[in-house]
Image (cartoon, grey):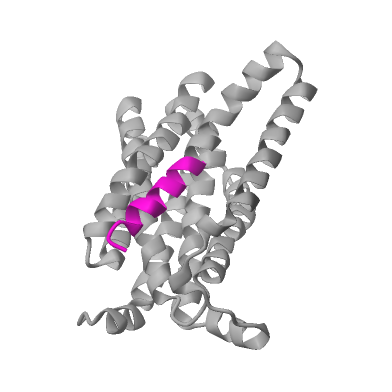
Amino acid sequence: ETRLGRAFSLHTFGGLAGFAVAPPLMLVLASLFDWRAALVIVGAVGIATGIVLVLFRALLRDDAERRKTAGMQALRQLLTRPLILMFLFTTFSSATSAGIYNFSIAAFVDIYGVELALASSSLTIFVVMTAAGVLPGGMLADKAGRHDLVLVVCTVIVIACILLAGWGALPFWLALGALGLAGLARGIVNASRDLMVRHIAGGASVGTAFAFVTTGFLLGQAIAPPIYGYLIDQGSPQFVFWASAAFSLISIGTVFASRTRYFRDKGVSG
């Protein structure tokens, strides 16, 4: 339990590393063979990974949290106020990242008048710094007594840095630095969020609770791009950063709304 935050952070870091490695790996494979062979190879690796997980599934079971609930009982355990609020936190956090991932490059070209290649470095910096924050975030989560406070502080940093990056009055290199700091804070928050979800899962199966909350990531990625696209069509690239910061601000509200149950269970007054 004392190193659970580090375990969560290692899991998240592996996902980010795979996301970062995939494009250059596909380019290398395509240059050595062709794009069809490259797809077959990475698909085969995925199948092999699935087989390994099936063969060693016993190592992945959590005996302390092995609960079997079915039907409406499992649904009632999931649809609690704290879990729904953490679902919303994940949704709005994902919506924040969607703006940076999908629209920040085009926005930077318009705001700062830089070349596309230089603007593209902003996304690279954001992704790299997010990955850089994940493992330290796991160590912080193991030591922190107030995971909700970590979520709030890191999200406030994300908001401030995103607004600075999209302001347009800073030199471009400072805007890149602000976006990098936002990515770092975004990475640090992950393990504390996961530990908070694990705690407030209550009687629900922890795996099911995580699956429910993580669905918010997919929802945020689905609903946010049309909103950002509409805002850009209104003629101001700064809207990308304002909307991204607004989504983060809303996510802070979900953390405060879930405080009562979390503090009561942990025996913290607040």
Where residue 181 sits, quadrant-wise, is top left
Count of labels in the image: 0
Q: Nearer the viewer, residue 222 or 208?
A: 208
Q: Main secondary structure of the magenta part?
A: helix
Where residue 259 sits, quadrant-wise, is bottom left
Q: Quadrant of the N terminus?
A: bottom left
Can you give x and y, in whole percent of width and height, for residue 39 in the image?
A: 74, 29
Can you give x and y, in whole percent of width and height, for residue 48 in the image?
A: 67, 39
Can you give x and y, in whole percent of width and height, for residue 232 in the image?
A: 58, 44
Residue at 72% in and 24% down: 38
On screen, residue 4 above or below 9: below
Residue at 50% in and 26% down: 120
Does residue 109 show up magenta in the picture?
no
For the view shown, which residue lies furthest in the top direction?
32
Classify residue 112 as left or right of residue 150.
right
On screen, residue 226 above or below 49: below
Residue range of the region highlighted in magenta in the rendering: 1-15
Residue at 77% in and 22% down: 37
Q: Quadrant of the C terminus?
A: bottom left
On screen, residue 5 above or below 161: below
Where residue 136 sits, quadrant-wise, is top left
Can you give x and y, in whole percent of width and height, for residue 153 in the image?
A: 26, 58
Residue at 31% in and 50% down: 137
Can the viewer see residue 115? no
Does residue 11 show up magenta in the picture?
yes
On screen, residue 16 above or below 223: above
Classify residue 39 as left or right of residue 114.
right
Can the viewer see residue 11? yes
